[in-house]
Image: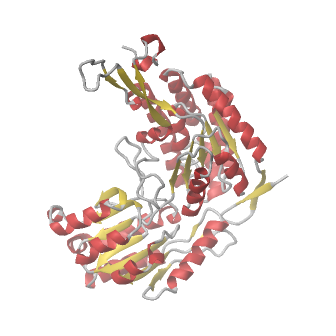
Amino acid sequence: MVTFVARDPRTGDPLGEFVETTPDAVSATAVAAAEAFAQTRHQPNRARVAWLSAIADAFDGAGADLLAAADAETALGPARLTGEWARTRAQVRLFAALVADGSYLETAFDGADPDAVPPRGDLRRMLVPIGPVANFAASNFPFAFSVPGGDTIAALAAGCPVIVKAHPSHPETSRRCAALIAGALAAAGAPDAMFAMIEGAGVAVGAALVMAPEITAVAFTGSRRGGRALYDLAATREIPIPVYAEMGSVNPVFVTAAALAARGDAIADGFAASMLNGTGQFCTSPGVLVVPVGDAGDGLVARVSSAVASAPPGYMLNATIRDGLEDQVAHTKRLSGVVDAADGERASDDGFGVGAVVLATDAETFITTPALRDEHFGPVAVVVRCDPVDMPAVARSIPGSLTGTIHAEADEAGGSAVTDLRDALIERVGRLVWNGFPTGVAIAPSMHHGGPYPATTLSGFTSVGQASVRRFLRPVTFQDVPQSALPPELRS
């Protein structure tokens, strides 16, 4: 029997031994999901509204036990986890409202027109669910991007069965969430196999899930290496399937000279708080700060460095992430043209503690050194000292990112310098932030949480907000189909 051990990030002590799901069990779970889809694919919207409402009700009464389990397994802290759990519960009700409204189906109608060139029959179009979805839970969000998170809820809202591959960093939290979801769905009349969870730390479990013929799409939040491996594997199937992988980014922040002069201290404090939030383990953590050369820029860098040096030590989610970050930082510090500007305190216990780091370089070194433009997943920032005219070139050197931020004054907004920087960032990011910081992603129809590769594998889709349901739907046009054979949503 193959097992894996989860450990306490604060102490390194084992929290429990967990059994890996076998490939045969994964296959059976996928077959059962396909059978559930055959039963539910034509159910009306109100059935899915009932499912989601039941899940939301179950979540509302379960916070204390889940928060305790998540805090023990992640060391993210009660305040962070409480906010994440509230967000997770709220988004279930938002998706229930979306399904009840029905507009997400994007129905379109064109009546028959024999005089058109060419002649047109009666055309009716809508989105339909694609089938069973595999969701790979994230390490850094035990709720919002894990078993009960947005990918699971969006797939259920679309009418797709979900099989979640739990993350081994927080297995007990995942089990408790899975039990809540399964119980709520059963109480609402959904088939048992509409939702399932599998476990494991090795690659065999995930590979078996991706390769199961019944799976029609994969959702993933995690590292570039993990997301790209799943993407490549899915492409080898006899019938390839989409992999919606969100793989993080450097989320650059640019500061103009005018903004620096007007509120440099506030920008420095906001940047430090954003990069340290959650020990830098947000996919939207700012990892690059581009600041004009000169005395004012020196002051901003000094203030960020002071905040980082005095910050209390934080904990990474597991030993693999911690060790990988420390190796990467050590390599980056050895690069020519890189200065170590600040090092925060590291916890002295046996857990997965890390200290925050600020590195500094110039624009030319940054543009010509690919390793500086890679995400350092953790409390690490690279400060780029830059002539303002070179900021668009710095922006264009950055690989695809989830976000890009500009701090500028109001009278600069329409000027050519800021416009050029804005346009350069639009080429590289999925969300442009003005005078703010990228951590914190609203759940809203207008939110786009995605970006050009390597931030995501499919930049036209979002993994946050109601539009995320679109990943698990596909369009079908019905031509001259009798009313009695049409889906209810397309009948006159």
Measured as percent of width and height from the top left, residue 154 is found at 50, 38
Colour mapping used in the image: secondary structure
- Which residue lies most toward the top here? 484
Task: Name the foreground residue: 94 vs 3.
Answer: 3
Residue 72 showing in the rendered view? yes
Residue 442 is left or right of residue 198, and the answer is: left
The answer to whether residue 472 is above or below residue 22 is above
Quadrant assignment, res 16 = bottom right
Task: Name the foreground residue: 401 vs 322.
Answer: 401
Question: Residue at image x 30%, y 80%?
Answer: 386
- Which residue lies most toward the bottom here? 336
Q: Quadrant of the C terminus?
A: top left
Measured as percent of width and height from the top left, residue 229 is found at 60, 58
- Which residue lies most toward the front here? 118
The answer to whether residue 287 is above or below residue 105 is below
Measured as percent of width and height from the top left, residue 181 is found at 62, 35
Task: Name the foreground residue: 24 vs 394.
Answer: 24
Measured as percent of width and height from the top left, residue 297 is found at 29, 80
Quadrant assignment, res 112 = top left
Residue 414 is left or right of residue 407, and the answer is: left
Residue 76 showing in the rendered view? no
Residue 84 is left or right of residue 147, and the answer is: left
Question: Residue at image x 19%, y 65%?
Answer: 409
The answer to whether residue 201 is above or below residue 252 is above
The answer to whether residue 448 is above or below residue 160 is below
Q: How many labels were placed on the picture?
A: 0
Question: Residue at image x 62%, y 45%?
Answer: 238
